[in-house]
Amino acid sequence: MSVQTIDVSVATRARACTVYALLREGAGWPSWSPIERFELVRESVDGGEGVGAVRLFRTGRIRSVERIVELVPDRRLSYVLEKGLAVRGYRADIDLSEDVSGTSIRWHSTFRSKMPGMGGLYRRTLTTFIRKCAEGLAEHSAAIEGVREADNRN
């Protein structure tokens, strides 16, 4: 089964530190994404939502359990899917690049389908979901900073 790739980019006029802070706080995801509920399943060894923390996100009947695997302050949050979808090797890297106009958010994911022939369907469905997450993150971070957003669809 082939590797599926999702690559979504949006822009916000907010600073990278604001965007990053929203990503780090799982409890806030339901306020800016389609995710309905959050639960911290296991804290990182340092406490809280650091590297190694396991987070549960619920949307409808779908429960995804994700482990944070990399954090670069104001630059990157990466996670892997532990369980919840019929995919293998799911990893997402959310990269932030700041310049004078604001922050670019790139949400890049790769995975393989557990079910033959379903990779494309999962990719399309997850791309739509991730785009909603990224756009909500961009809009919410700008609202927090009180800056006005332009059309952020790239």
Image: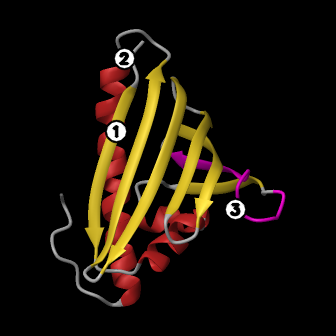
Quadrant (top left, top right, bottom left, bottom right) of the N terminus: top left
- Decide: few, some or many residues near mark 3? Use Cα within 10 Å; few <14, some 14-19, many ≥20: many
User: Which amino acid, by three-letter code, is at mark 1?
Assistant: Ile
Can residue 82 be seen in the rendering of this structure? yes
The image shows residue 10, relative to residue 131, as above or below, that is: below
Residue shown at 84%/57% (left/top)?
A: 45
Query: Which label number is shown at residue 49?
Result: 3
Query: Which label number is shown at residue 118?
Result: 2
Foreground tag (2 vs 1): 1
Foreground tag (3 vs 2): 3
Determine if the magenta segment contains residue 49.
yes
Residue shown at 33%/90% (left/top)?
A: 146
- Decide: few, some or many residues near mark 1? Use Cα within 10 Å; few <14, some 14-19, many ≥20: some
Residue 115, percent from left and from top: 45, 12
The residue tagged with tag 3: helix, strand or loop?
loop
The mark that comes first in sequence, 3 or 2, is 3
User: Which amino acid, by three-letter code, is at mark 3?
Assistant: Glu
Residue 65, percent from left and from top: 63, 41
Residue shown at 51%/60% (left/top)?
A: 76
The mark that comes first in sequence, 1 or 3, is 1
Residue linked to disc 1: 6
Q: Nearer the viewer, residue 104 or 143?
A: 104
Residue shown at 18%/58% (left/top)?
A: 154
